[in-house]
Amino acid sequence: MKKTLIFLLLISLISCEEKDDLLGMNFDEETYNENRNLWQESGILNYTFSQEYFSTSIGGQPELNTIVRNNELESIIVKSSGEDITSDELIYYDNITDLYDFIDSVVKDANEQINSSDKAMKGAIIDVEYDETYHYPTKISCSGYYPDGYLGGLSITIFVNYFQID
């Protein structure tokens, strides 16, 4: 009986610690700033990359090939069909700077929600992986923590692949 009680006590302590880890903002701002600065300093203006966007609100989108010239979007094409898209059809990012701006926006918005007494979000994890050579984000994962069975909310993943300097 004592072993069972101790086991249950340990499980409850572990689950409390896990919930506490979900409270507040979990984002490596130092690594983010370092990579963003290195990307900006690289001066890369002409490149191509693919992007895939997933969220719980809209589901997955097709992989998009993005062509950037002078740091401006030249074209964006659905990889599977080769068709150009219009801005209304899908969520996409014009260039790598736009992806960094998205991260800034998500962090700011999540912090505002976490610190607001009338919002359901109590914590967020913004996890970004970077290319070691060119310092652009290769994977962006954004998750909100909502206690009490809240449905919906922050849950986005973006993959950036096939980056090539032109």
Image (cartoon, grey):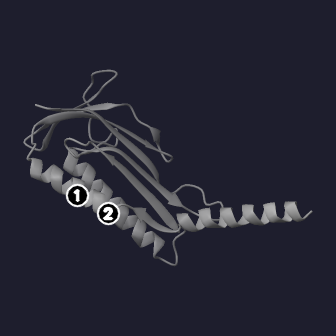
The kind of residue on which mark 1 rests is: Glu
What separation in Å lies between label 1 and label 2 (alpha carbons)?
Answer: 8 Å
Q: Position of 19 compared to 28: left or right? A: right
Asked if the residues shown at circle 1 and circle 2 are in contact, with their CB atoms under 8 angstroms apart, the answer is no
Q: Residues within 10 Å of mark 1 (few under 14, many from 20)?
A: few
Q: Is residue 126 above or below residue 134?
A: below
Residue closest to the eye, 120 or 143: 143
x 13%, y 52%: residue: 40
Determine which quarter of the picture holds residue 31.
Answer: bottom left
| Residue 22 x %, y % | 54, 63
x 50%, y 66%: residue: 123
Residue 67 can be seen, yes or no: no
| Residue 159 x %, y % | 36, 39
Which residue was labeled with disc 1? 34
x 74%, y 64%: residue: 10
Q: Position of 101 compared to 38: left or right? A: right
Q: Is residue 150 above or below residue 140?
A: below
Q: Secondary structure at mark 2?
A: helix
| Residue 116 x %, y % | 47, 76
User: Which of the image's four quarters has the N terminus?
Assistant: bottom right
Q: Secondary structure at mark 1?
A: helix
x 10%, y 31%: residue: 166
Which residue was labeled with disc 2? 29
Q: Which residue is outermost to the top?
A: 81
Residue closest to the eye, 142 or 152: 142
Determine which quarter of the picture holds residue 27.
Answer: bottom left
Q: How many marks?
A: 2
The mark that comes first in sequence, 1 or 2, is 2
Residue closest to the eye, 32 or 84: 32
The kind of residue on which mark 2 rests is: Glu
